[in-house]
Image: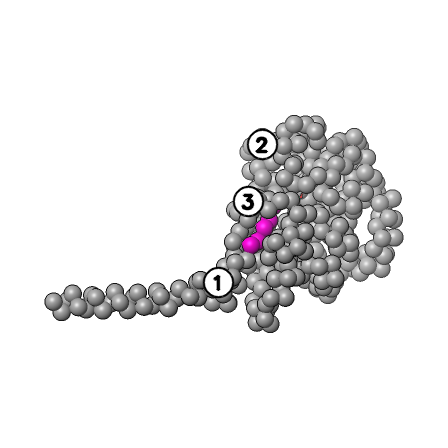
Amino acid sequence: MRLIRRSFVATCVAAAAAAAAMPALAQSKEVKIGYALAINSHYGAAAQAWADSVEKSTSNAFKFKQFPASALGGERELIEGLQLGTVEAVIVSTGALSNFVPDVGVVDIPFLFRDTAHARAVLDGAFGQDLLGKFHKRGLIALAWGEQGFRHLTNNKHAVQNVADLKGLKIRVTENPVHITAFRTLGASPTPMSWPEVIGALQQGTIDGQENPISVLSSAKLWQVQKHLTLSAHVYAPVALIVSPSFWGSLNDAQKAAFTQGAKSGAMASRAFVDAVEKKGVEEAKSHGMQVVEKVDQAAFRKALEPAYKQYATKFGQKTLDAISNTK
Ligand code: PAF
């Protein structure tokens, strides 16, 4: 009898504790977060780290709901969603971003960054942090720079070893004026297209190729639709972790700090993921039959890009370009 009473009391205590926890759960504010790639990509890693950090530091006052794989639309739609307040957070490449925040286009200049360490130093330093600040007057709150890696070229026509091999190739590029200028200057036929259309267009042959980092190649299994990979490393690809201004306006200072810290954790998670996938991704592509050109003569590509560099200097200012180049 005493045993039954004790277990009855224990059940009541557990039920009371659960009931006490419930209002906290019920009050969790949902944070919809959208991104273009699969949940097991560098974007998924960033979103999860961001979610874990915010949920923990706010004692679950917020609950992230992930919308991976372009479920909320292409990157342009995601950015517009932030401005409209229909999505609270996104992780996007700079592909479509410079149509909203033109100053961002500077980081898309080919061969601007010497290597990953240089790019990270610029983005984590004063220049990159100032750039985040420029999102505000464009109706966006950017909190951190994550990473995709350096972009490389894939196509179905032939191995691209040098600039001449690009002639006439229909290459899908992001809706990014800096990238479009670069590929046009190199003699290719750049075709701006939103990411959700790319795999279908490659399958149907309406484009010959595309360019993206190893992280994307691996996540999207591009070897299923592309034969040739050229490790051109022509452009460094950062990603921005951004929240909607209306959502931001609803947060108190402590919550803002939690979201900023969480975005930084997300950015670091994307970089760690990229470091790992870059090591194994090329071997994976080869094992699936991709023909890989391991290296290109980057100096020859830079030379061919000289007319484009003149346009970039006019657009962004030679001083800015030099400041980035001279960052150690
Ligand atoms: O090529 C793009 O549009 C972007 O790199 C992608 C794949 C959507 C990831 O942000």
Q: Residues within 10 Å of mark 1 (few under 14, many from 20)?
A: some
Between the residue at mark 3 and the residue at mark 1, the CA separation in whole angstroms equals: 25 Å
Residue placed under numbered mark 2 in the picture: 224
Which of the two marks, 2 or 3, is nearer to us in this view? Answer: 3
Quarter of the picture containing the N terminus is: bottom left
| Secondary structure of residue under mark 2 | helix
Q: Residue 32, located in which quarter of the rendered image?
A: bottom right
| Secondary structure of residue under mark 3 | loop
Q: Is residue 274 left or right of residue 187?
A: left
| Secondary structure of residue under mark 1 | loop
Q: Residue at x 34, y 68 (%)?
A: 17
Q: Residue 260, located in which quarter of the rendered image?
A: bottom right
- In the image, 280 versus 9, the foreground residue is 9
Give me the disc on residue 28: 1
Residue placed under numbered mark 3 in the picture: 38
- In the image, 196 versus 94, the foreground residue is 196
Q: Position of residue 132 (x, y in %)?
A: 70, 61
State if disc 1 and disc 3 touch (CB < 8 Å): no
Cβ of mark 2 under 8 Å from ligand 1: the answer is no
Between the residue at mark 2 and the residue at mark 3, the CA separation in whole angstroms equals: 16 Å
The magenta span reads 32-38
Q: Position of residue 274 (x, y in %)?
A: 59, 50
Which of the two marks, 3 or 1, is nearer to us in this view? Answer: 1
